[in-house]
Image: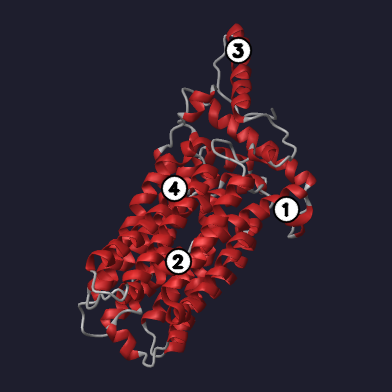
Amino acid sequence: MAEKDKQQQQISWYTWGCALFAAVGSLLYGIDSGIVSTVIAQPRFVHYFDPFTPSIKGALVSTFGAGSVFGVWFAAWSADAIGRKRTIAIAAAIAVIAGIIQAAAVHIGMLIAGRIIGGFAVGIMNVTIPIYNSEIAPPAKRGMIAGLHAQFVGFGFATANWVGFGCSYSTSDFQWRFPLAFQCLPAIIVLVGIYFLPFSPRWLLEKERDDEAYEVIKRLHGNIGHDDTFFRAEFSQMREQIRFEKSVTNIGWGEVFRTPSNRKRLLLAVLVQVFTQLSGINVVNYYQTDLYKSLGMSGHMPTLLAGIYGLVGPLANLICLYYVDSWGRKKTLWITGLFMTLDIALVMGLSGGYGSSDNTVAKGFTIAFIFCFTAIYSLGYNSIHYIYVPEIMTMAIRAKGSAVAVICNVCINIIFNQVSPIAFSEVGYKYYSLFICTNFVGAIVVFAIFPETKGKSLEEIAQIFGDEVVVADLNRVQDKVGENDEEHHQAEHADGQEITPQQPKTT
């Protein structure tokens, strides 16, 4: 298959359906993360949990991340041991319980406990869904499919903001209890439909369930090209590479650190997750209502602005999903890093110069650049850090390596969630200077050391890191399968027999 044909790979409706349904679990992360920023701004919530000090506020937000750490560790085991599909189902069940506890909270301790349990569920989803979608996607469209996780996280965040805005008109505890209960909705949808989601074909091959894997790949990618050579070649490449890796790989955590290639993978995965948090995006996301209040906004205006802000990211992310497989990962990351540096510098300058003034035009520009920040972030880091981490990992360490990287992300998030309310109260707009530095450093590091992975199958990416690959690239495997079919056709035609394409043998 020519390179031009490879870039024209189409995504079947079945693949779309599987990826979109899995990404409903991603809504959970967006809703759980976003709902707290509007809930803590509701007057009835603040009155109910009075005194609601900055340290309690930080604890409420940051303990969600603490629960997420444990969820990530659980996913590192369960995604390999019982499969990606069953792991997603477990997370959905836990999320329903967490939503009920939060909505029924009668004191701050109960609410924090619910947030920790909810964080556990989200941590599981945050590792497992990007892995699952990357493993069911055709190589040339993997960025689009794996990036659906970030897209639905963004949709969830936007939905949470608008639910919070609508509930702000209530004068009862419904103002904050309903948004917290709303977190259960995507989890219930996942629980109802999980039966129809197929297992990851690569996980099936890892468990030596080859026939099931072959049927799943056929349903997922059987429409690519004018014959069945693509999915048969893909199956052959997956099977032989996974078998080879199993023959030379020790199963366990030690494998993540054993070889130079795996250590490099882990370094890059950790860096992309760390730079994602060091961008400052979650500081803006979680405390944006406080930022608007510091600019003189009052009444329903902070939650209204939060609702509009929440729509900007998903719209920009759609552009990223459409182009990420042609733009590539590396270039998109370092360019957006530079633009985030410039944007947050403008926010800092305008906040410092006009935050306490009566200049409404300057305040309007400050809010506009806050909105631009999420748009720029969503054009790059938002999707790509979920795409890049699972695709650079081998099958043997994909769940474990992804878990380590995500935990680094979560730990930094916890620190920022805890210290940001205090930092804003102590140094105000000067706090932004930290993110000016971190975004600039991130852009330089990505430009200097990150390899490009677009368009390659997960098995082919191993070559970038110097690993031995026992099968040729997917184009050559497909050509070989086609040649074998032609030879078989000619031989059978000579005997006057009907031809039925067979499951490919070792190539």
- Crowdedness of circle 3 by 10 Å Cα count: few (<14), some, many (20+)? few
Inspect the image, locate mark 1, and give the three-letter code of the amino acid beneath it: Arg
Task: Please tell me which residue is depicted at 73% across the width and 47% down the height of the picture.
Answer: 261
Label number found at residue 18:
4
Nearest-to-viewer mark from 1 and 3: 1
Task: Please tell me which residue is depicted at 21% across the width and 84% down the height of the picture.
Answer: 171
Q: Secondary structure at mark 3?
A: helix
Marks 4 and 1, Cα distance to the nearest angstrom?
Answer: 32 Å
- Relative to 295, residue 204 above or below: above
Mark 3 or 2, nearer chain start: 2
Q: Position of residue 503 (x, y in %)?
A: 61, 30
Inspect the image, locate mark 3, and give the three-letter code of the amino acid beneath it: Glu
Label number found at residue 223:
none
Nearest-to-viewer mark from 4 and 1: 1
- Relative to 238, residue 339 above or below: below
- Crowdedness of circle 1 by 10 Å Cα count: few (<14), some, many (20+)? some
Report the residue marked by disc 3: 492
Mark 1 and mark 4 in contact (Cβ < 8 Å)? no
Mark 2 or 1, nearer chain start: 1
Inspect the image, locate mark 4, and give the three-letter code of the amino acid beneath it: Cys
Label number found at residue 282:
2
Q: Is residue 289 visible?
A: yes
Report the residue marked by disc 1: 263
Task: Please tell me which residue is depicted at 57% across the width and 13% down the height of the picture.
Answer: 497
Marks 1 and 3, Cα distance to the nearest angstrom?
Answer: 50 Å
Q: Secondary structure at mark 2?
A: helix
39 and 93: which one is in front? 39
Inspect the image, locate mark 2, and give the three-letter code of the amino acid beneath it: Asn
Q: Secondary structure at mark 1?
A: helix
Marks 3 and 4, Cα distance to the nearest angstrom?
Answer: 38 Å
Mark 1 or 3, nearer chain start: 1
Marks 2 and 1, Cα distance to the nearest angstrom?
Answer: 28 Å
